[in-house]
């Protein structure tokens, strides 16, 4: 099995490769593709002692030819692009976050043309491959690529899985034995039921302050809001439910998350390039710092070591790859087209929900209907996501303005006009 990682010079590529090596997949070659050869060299140095059948290349078609599984991880515009997106929002007094609100829409506008191009190359060079995308904003990129690849592209995020894992641990149950109901969009969703032997244990958790205190998301939002909702929100909903507090947190941090990550990664790549023999150790230290500082601008306490040790999106991505290639079946929370599971959304609108996965693909499972609040926020944000996809493809000023003007985290026509012009200017030719 030939496996290709697009964006293979990215910092988190070793996580995917090492999880891949530990899996049941019969991998004969791992191809790392990136447009930046020096970054590829550094990541190859990090992985040099792992014994993986590794190849690096800057030739996209060559990387895709014959691939059975393609992981898409590129950061379009690099970390400088992320910083620009976050700063553009903050300069207008808005939330500046990579995947949420104005920053997320700016990133999406830049990412969609690249996602379209990569999807077309995959369709030409590896039309039987399963494509697992982890590029942010995950829901938007998955929806854009699905226009060409259909159900063969699936989006992955680790945030819902972490929420489920922490909630089950607080209840003292094995999350592998429980069935969960999770629904939303990427970075905008809710854990709505935890079923064990047919009994929903979520009310027990929501009504128990001591148990709730063990769940990171409950500490973030407060037990009172969790009780009021009757669900456990994804951590990224903090940007919506506590917009002003989150904005103060970013301002107090003195720099954006993008600036923090960019500076740390510049240091890592430069140091590792200068001494490749130390690349693996340097990467391990940099990765430990990155994990520990994740969402530090809004998180009320340091991350639990056990939570970090459980792994991130690489664990879900490899589990998904195994199931898609005939090595087992199961349920995962994934980004897939809604089909008929959310009646108010078009069938091709990508949602994040529990799916049944096997070698035929990932099928969203029907849970209980979305509440008025869940459906309202999902529909509003999804309409903005679909508008930015249309604008990125056509250059339509109207669609781009609609995306920013309607988003609940913008709330300013002046800002929407300025940001929509910036987004159109930033779309790659």
Image (cartoon, rainbow, N blue to C red):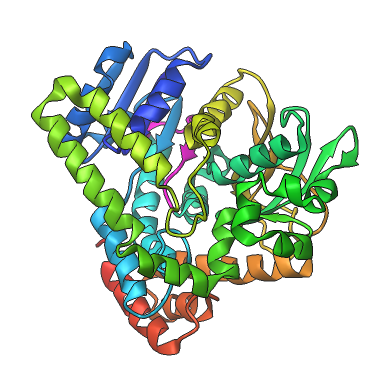
Whole-percent x, y for residue 401 in the image: 43, 80
- Kindly give the residue lying farthest to the front in the view shown: 210
**Quarter that holds the C terminus:** bottom left
Assess whether residue 132 is covered by the magenta stretch. yes
Q: Is residue 305 left or right of residue 88?
A: right
Whole-percent x, y for residue 314 in the image: 47, 32
Is 101 placed above or below 13 here?
A: below
Which range of residues does the magenta coloring cover? 125-136
Q: Is residue 6 left or right of residue 334?
A: left
Residue in the image at 65% along x and 19% along y: 328
Is 341 placed above or below 314 here?
A: below
Res 394 visible: yes
Residue in the image at 34% along x and 52% along y: 114
Foreground pick, 38 / 199: 199
Foreground pick, 429 / 157: 157
Whole-percent x, y for residue 253 in the image: 35, 62
Is 306 placed above or below 372 here?
A: above
Res 1 visible: no
Foreground pick, 384 / 92: 92
Whole-percent x, y for residue 239 in the image: 53, 66
Foreground pick, 301 / 90: 301
């Amino acid at each position: 099995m030939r496996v290709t990682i697009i964006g293979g010079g990215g910092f988190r590529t070793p996580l995917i490769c090492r999880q891949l090596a530990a899996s049941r997949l019969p991998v004969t070659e791992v191809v790392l593709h990136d447009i930046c050869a020096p970054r590829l060299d550094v990541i190859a140095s990090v992985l040099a002692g792992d014994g993986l059948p590794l190849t690096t290349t800057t030739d996209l078609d060559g990387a895709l030819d014959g691939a059975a599984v393609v992981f898409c991880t590129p950061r379009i515009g690099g970390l400088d692009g992320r910083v620009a997106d976050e700063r553009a929002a903050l300069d207008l007094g808005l939330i500046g976050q990579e995947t949420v609100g104005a920053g997320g829409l700016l990133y999406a506008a830049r990412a969609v043309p690249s996602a379209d191009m990569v999807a077309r190359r995959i369709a030409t060079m590896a039309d039987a491959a399963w494509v697992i995308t982890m590029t942010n904003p995950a829901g938007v990129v998955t929806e854009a690529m699905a226009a060409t690849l259909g159900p063969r592209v699936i989006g992955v995020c680790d945030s819902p899985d972490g929420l489920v894992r922490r909630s089950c641990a607080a209840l003292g149950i094995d999350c592998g034995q429980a069935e969960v109901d999770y629904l939303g969009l990427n970075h905008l969703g809710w854990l709505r039921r935890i079923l064990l032997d047919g009994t929903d244990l979520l009310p027990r958790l929501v009504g128990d302050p001591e148990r709730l205190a063990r769940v990171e998301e409950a500490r973030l939002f407060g037990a009172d809001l969790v009780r009021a909702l009757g669900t456990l929100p994804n951590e990224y909903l903090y940007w919506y439910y506590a917009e002003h507090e989150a904005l103060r947190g970013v301002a107090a941090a003195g720099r954006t998350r993008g600036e923090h990550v960019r500076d740390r990664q510049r240091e890592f790549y430069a140091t590792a390039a200068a001494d490749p023999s130390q690349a693996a150790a340097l990467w391990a230290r940099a990765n430990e710092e990155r994990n520990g500082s994740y969402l530090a601008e809004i998180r009320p306490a340091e991350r639990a070591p056990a939570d970090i040790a459980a792994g991130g999106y690489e664990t879900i991505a490899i589990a998904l790859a195994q199931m898609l290639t005939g090595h087992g079946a199961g349920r995962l929370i994934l980004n897939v087209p809604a089909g008929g599971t959310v009646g108010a959304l078009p069938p091709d609108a990508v949602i994040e929900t529990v799916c049944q996965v096997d070698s035929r693909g990932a099928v969203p499972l029907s849970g209980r209907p979305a509440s008025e609040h869940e459906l309202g926020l999902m529909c509003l944000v999804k309409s903005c996501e679909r508008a930015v996809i249309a604008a990125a493809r056509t250059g339509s000023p109207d669609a781009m303005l609609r995306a920013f003007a309607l988003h609940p985290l913008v709330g300013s026509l002046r800002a929407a006009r300025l940001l929509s012009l910036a987004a159109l200017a930033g779309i790659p030719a």
